[in-house]
Image: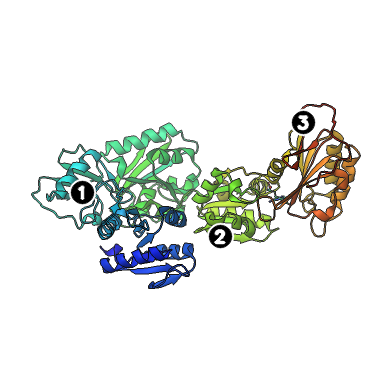
């Protein structure tokens, strides 16, 4: 089978290379690629397993890894997108006993695994739902296709495996993937490709192709129920199969219309949008062109035009405009509609924070948002902190400082319909990008920005990890102050520090000192010392969750700027905060009650 020809047998050990060579020789095909230094006598060598494997996968080369499944899964996870174009990937245990087709089961991996199992005397672990016949799995059709009567799929497949040939009826759609199916015009079994909702007979397999685009228009604020009712009625009155609907489409001014997204979500298809200009191109094909609509939106139709625009030049309008009080709906058909390729999606901006450093302190919601994003915007170091999660994304690196440019760029990209993650460190809402995005939205009247879907995901802020590392210094009322005077006037910072001192808040200090801004931290210390004891514990946390992390607990009176830089966060206790030794090191906490502080006076808290 074409896709599985010329596989690469990937060997990471000497034994693995031997097994790989044996499989290659007996298959009579393929090349052994061995890890340099660990293997010998291979057809080719490589040094970086990750990079090499990803490269092979991207080039579409079938891969047989003589290694654990985990190695292949971890390395390729970021690369997975379209199962139609992915090459087969198989893991073979180094003893040859287990052969696991991981990807591309129906593109030759199952078959190849079977052949390897014969060579090694092992077992092929086939996990795909059905068997394939001539490379076709009727019960697992290509993306966009649906089996209308899944129960029948098994019996039809079984009959075909037994040698029966079905007759094929194609009422809609382009069914190229069925080309190799042996056919018999008088066969007792039938495969019917249709975008109509029909009752199938027991000897018939119904396949619904991705052929329909549902165009909708509605007044601003139209109820979800009204649009649902109209679309459902339109589809069912026309006798169409909902499974063949590929997209709900409309004009771009509706990109933030809740009812439109709701109906797309309900039908499990994407919502896509066209500009008025794109819709106006469809005017000659409209059944109901309207000068009134043109005056309102700049195109002679919305529902019909969007459906036709999605269906493309081969498309035809099969249900002209249907109306309810506040909404319209029309349906167009084309042989094969790929919804991701028509119009544009609603732009999405996820505002996320990486946590202070390593991945262990990043919340799963952030990982999910990053995984869903096509584009990452952020200071290069923060994007680097994402590690492999950033692989395969378009990166828009910015220098430190260019905050407004970063946010504008993220908004512009999202306005183009992209899925963007704007990445800060720590929590994105704590002295970071989230507030600036909302400030820009508040200031701007750019309607394209107004229509973007935005979500903000929290992150672990530096002060939270500093507090956790040191015990529980934030145990009572606290606040956070940034000492950076780039955006905040010195007087304001001083005023707040004075208030904090008087009110006896625990205080986390961000941006405590830079290369040039050195004096402020000592001014702050002196201001606080007027209201809290000299031995008030201070957590000095540098490079949290990064290499060379350091945590120190010192007495407030001993705080010196020499130990502090831009990658330090401080937590200064209140008058009740205490330090103690436990497990051979110092900790600090702030009690929630107001018992008199009774720690050993003058204790030094360094470790
Ligand atoms: N959004 C970030 C803060 C950005 S402001 C957050 O929620 O953590 C930058 C300041 O954060 C730095 O000057 C430092 O005070 C603090 N900071 C950020 N990451 C840190 C880390 N890994 N270790 C110590 N301090 C850190």
The answer to whether residue 370 is visible is yes
The residue that mark 2 highlights is 395
Residue extending furthest toward the left: 186
Marks 3/2 in contact by CB < 8 Å: the verdict is no
Within 8 Å: ligand 1 and the Cβ of disc 1?
no
Residue 557 versus residue 597 in the image, above or below: below
Tell me the distance, in whole angstroms, between the alpha carbons under discs 2 and 1: 45 Å
Q: Nearer the viewer, residue 125 or 119?
A: 119
**Above or below 466: residue 54:** below
C-beta proximity under 8 Å, tags 3 and 1: no
Does the numbered disc 2 mark a residue whose Cβ is under 8 Å from ligand 1?
Answer: no
Upstream in the sequence, badge 3 or badge 2?
A: 2
Q: Which residue is at a point 45% across and 37% down the rendered structure image?
A: 259
Position of the N terminus, as image quadrant, is bottom left
Mark number, residue 171: 1
Which of marks 1 and 2 precedes in the sequence? 1
Q: Who's the residue at 43% across and 71% down the image?
A: 45
Rendered image: mark on residue 253: none
Which of 548 and 505 lies nearest the eye of the viewer? 548
Q: Secondary structure at mark 2?
A: strand
Within 10 angstroms of label 2, few (less than 14), some, or many (20 or more) residues? some
Mark 3 C-beta closer than 8 Å to ligand 1:
no
* Figure colour scheme: rainbow
Q: Which residue is mark 3?
A: 591
Residue 460 position, x and y percent, is 64, 44
Residue 170, horizontal then vertical, whole percent: 20, 50
Residues at marks 3 and 2, CA–CA distance in whole angstroms: 45 Å
Which comes before the other along the chain, label 3 or label 1?
A: 1
Q: Nearer the viewer, mark 3 or mark 2?
A: 3
* Left or right: residue 472 compared with residue 120: right
């Amino acid at each position: 089978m074409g896709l599985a020809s010329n596989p690469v047998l990937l060997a990471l050990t000497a034994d693995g290379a031997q097994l790989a060579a044996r499989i290659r020789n007996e298959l009579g095909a393929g090349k052994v690629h061995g890890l340099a230094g660990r293997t010998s006598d291979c057809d080719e060598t490589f040094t970086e397993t990750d990079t090499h494997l990803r490269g092979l996968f991207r080039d579409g080369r079938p891969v047989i890894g003589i290694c654990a499944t985990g190695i292949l899964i971890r390395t390729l996870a970021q690369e997975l997108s379209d199962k139609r174009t992915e090459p087969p990937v198989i893991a073979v245990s180094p003893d040859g006993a287990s052969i696991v087709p991981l990807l591309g089961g129906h593109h030759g991996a199952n078959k190849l695994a079977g052949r390897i199992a014969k060579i090694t005397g092992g077992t092929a672990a086939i996990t795909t739902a059905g068997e394939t016949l001539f490379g076709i799995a009727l019960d697992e059709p290509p993306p966009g296709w649906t089996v209308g009567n899944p129960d029948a799929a098994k019996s039809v497949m079984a009959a075909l495996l037994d040698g029966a040939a079905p007759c094929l009826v194609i009422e809609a759609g382009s069914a190229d993937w069925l080309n190799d199916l042996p056919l018999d015009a008088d066969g007792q079994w039938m495969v019917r490709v249709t975008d109509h909702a029909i009752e199938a007979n027991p000897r018939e397999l119904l396949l619904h192709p991705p052929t329909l685009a549902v165009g909708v228009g509605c007044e601003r604020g139209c109820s979800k129920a009204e649009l649902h009712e109209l679309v459902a009625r339109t589809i069912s009155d026309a006798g169409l199969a909902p499974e063949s609907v590929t997209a709900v489409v409309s004009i771009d001014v509706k990109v933030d219309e809740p009812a439109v997204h709701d109906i797309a979500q309900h039908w499990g298809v994407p919502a896509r949008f066209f500009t008025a200009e794109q819709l106006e191109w469809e005017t000659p094909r409209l059944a109901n062109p309207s000068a009134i609509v043109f005056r309102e939106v700049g195109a002679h139709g919305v529902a019909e035009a969007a459906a036709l625009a999605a269906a493309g030049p081969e498309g035809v309008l099969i249900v002209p405009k249907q109306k309810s009080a506040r909404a319209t709906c029309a349906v167009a058909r084309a042989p094969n509609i790929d919804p991701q390729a028509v119009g544009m999606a609603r732009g999405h901006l996820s505002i996320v924070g990486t946590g202070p450093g390593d991945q262990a302190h990043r919340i799963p919601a952030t990982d999910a948002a990053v995984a869903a994003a096509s584009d990452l915007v952020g200071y290069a170091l923060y994007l680097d902190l994402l590690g492999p999660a950033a692989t395969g994304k378009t990166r828009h690196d910015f220098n430190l400082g260019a905050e407004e440019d970063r946010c504008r760029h993220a908004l512009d990209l999202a306005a183009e319909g992209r899925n963007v993650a704007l990445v800060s460190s720590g929590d994105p809402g704590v002295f970071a990008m989230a507030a600036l995005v909302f400030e820009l939205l508040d200031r701007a009247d750019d309607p394209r920005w107004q229509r973007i879907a935005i979500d903000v995901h929290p992150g672990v802020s530096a002060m939270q990890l500093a507090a956790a590392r040191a015990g529980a210094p934030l145990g009572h009322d606290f606040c956070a102050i940034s000492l950076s005077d780039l955006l905040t006037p010195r007087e304001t910072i001083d005023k707040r520090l004075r208030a904090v001192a008087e009110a006896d808040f625990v205080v986390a200090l961000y941006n405590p000192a830079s290369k040039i801004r050195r004096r402020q931290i000592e001014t702050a210390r002196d201001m606080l010392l007027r209201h809290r004891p000299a031995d008030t514990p201070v957590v000095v946390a540098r490079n949290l969750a990064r290499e060379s992390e350091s945590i120190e607990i010192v007495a407030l009176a001993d705080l010196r700027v020499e130990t502090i830089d831009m990658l330090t966060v401080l937590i200064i206790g209140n008058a009740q905060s205490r330090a103690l030794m436990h497990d051979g090191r110092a900790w600090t906490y702030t009690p929630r009650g107001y018992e008199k502080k009774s720690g050993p006076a003058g204790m030094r808290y360094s470790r």
